[in-house]
Every structure is written in C-alpha cells, then in structure tokens.
Amino acid sequence: MRDDVVQIAQDLIGKTLCTDVEGYLCKAKITETEAYRGWGDKACHAHLGITGRNQIMFEEGGQAYVYLCYGIHHLFNIVTNIKGNADAVLIRAAEPIQGLQAMQLRRGELKNQYSLTSGPGNLSKAMGISKSHYGDSLVGNTIWIEEAPSVKAEKIIASHRVGINYAEEDALLPWRFRIKDSLWTSKPK
DNA sequence: TAGGTGATCTTG
DNA sequence: AAGATCACCTAT
C-alpha cells in the first residue's frame, strides 16, 4: 500500500484536505492528484538524487513537500513512502467544503468560482499553504488529511501528467487521477 | 500562445 | 557568479 505511490494517489481522491492557517479552518475534498515515484520516474524531482529542495521526499512518509514553482506558485505534495524511497503525491485540485470565505479572501476576485481551488498553485493559495509548511507533519494540527468515503474506481479517470515534457517517455504514464465530471479540477487534457 | 516570476541546480 | 530551467496561471 504505502509502497505503491500510484495506488495512494488514487486512494487520496475523495478524501478531505484540511488546513488551519492564520486562524482560518479550511477543508476541501480532493478531486485531482498526480503520483511521482522517486525511482524510475524522470518526472519526479527526486529521480536524480537528493538535493536541498527535495530532501524531504527521502524521509519517512506523512510529511508535506512544498516548493515554489515558476517563482509564483507553492505546490503541495504528500510524501508517501518509507525513508529512502522518494515518492510523493501532488495535490492538484479540490472542492471547497469549509472555510470558503477565507479561500476567497486569499484568492481575491475570480472570474469563475471553480478556479478557486483548481490547479495546484491556486489550491495551495486558497488553503494558505506556502513554503513555510515544508516538512510539516500531516498528522499534526496545521495540515492534515481526513478520511472520507472512497470514490468508486469507475468514477476516477486516469490520464497522463501535464507540464513535464522533459520527462520524455515517463510523461506518458497515466499517473494523474481525477474525479469524472467534477467541475473542480484543473483543465482536462 | 506568451510572458511574468524567483528559487533551485549546474556550470565555469 | 551567472544562466538555464521549471510538477503554473492569466491575459491577449
């Protein structure tokens, strides 16, 4: 289970992501994830070895790997495997359950409500997740995952990951999962 | 479809 | 010390 990051990514769909940041409690149902495997996956930041940025992925699972992308976006990942196996799941989109006001406050005016928490950069911003949460425990009281009824396999669509053309053939791996017909996902491809 | 944005990694 | 790269977003 914990040694199969792809399975974990699929299982995380439908669960509840919770944050308690700056005095706001926010909860959202996860609608889209991507799996990254440290060993044998060129798209994973860790596949070339340990560096200052990715070292948390080599630690015991259950911690947050947050990093800044394109100078703007804080992307939130969950480290999933045992120490030494650098697997992680990127949370790409979610559906707001609680704390909607705080999310809107953090995101500002939007053209459509669905973009509030759709897309990894947007989601992190709405939930108040930033680099200061790098290495936070996900069983703590700042960021955590709550169990929820699992989503049926036939309602989950697997597709290839996006934005990782440099990964060559690994870019085609169907390691992106999202809820079928959910409006709260980033753009389909 | 292109550009903003800044940490990170690599090279010299 | 500098330059290329990048798991994205928004607007034209």
Image: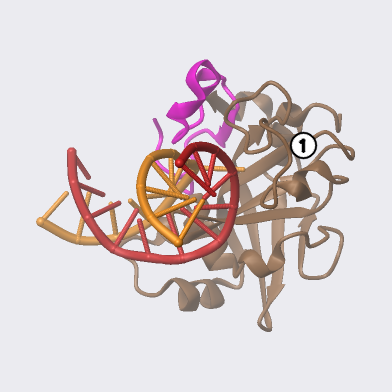
Chain colours: A brown, B red, C orange
Instruction: Say which residue appears at 55% left-offset and 77% top-offset.
Output: A102
Answer with left or right where residue C2 lies relative to residue A141. Answer: left
Residue B9 % position (x, y)? 59, 43
Residue on which the image places disc 1:
A86
Residue type, label 1: Ala
Q: Chain of mark 1?
A: A
* Residue nearest the viewer, comparing B4 with A5: B4
What's the magenta bit mostly, secondary-structure-wise? loop
Q: Quadrant of the N terminus of chain A?
A: top right
Residue A140 % position (x, y)? 86, 65
Q: Quadrant of the C terminus of chain A?
A: top left
Q: Report which quarter residue A16 is drawn in.
A: bottom right
* Residue nearest the viewer, comparing A130 with A50: A50
Instruction: Say which residue appears at 89% left-offset and 40% top-offset.
Output: A83
Decide: is A157 above or below A146: above
Answer with left or right where residue A101 lies relative to residue A63. Answer: left
Answer with left or right where residue A133 lies relative to residue A180. Answer: right
* Residue nearest the viewer, comparing A49 with A127: A49
Q: Is residue A175 magenta?
A: yes
Do we see residue A101 in this rendering?
Answer: yes
Decide: is A81 above or below A26: above
Residue A96 % position (x, y)? 57, 61
Magenta range:
A160-189
Do we see residue A148 in this rendering?
Answer: no
Q: Is residue A65 magenta?
A: no
For label 1, the crowd category at 10 Å Cα-Cα, with few meaning under 14, some 14 to 19 and many 20 or more, is many
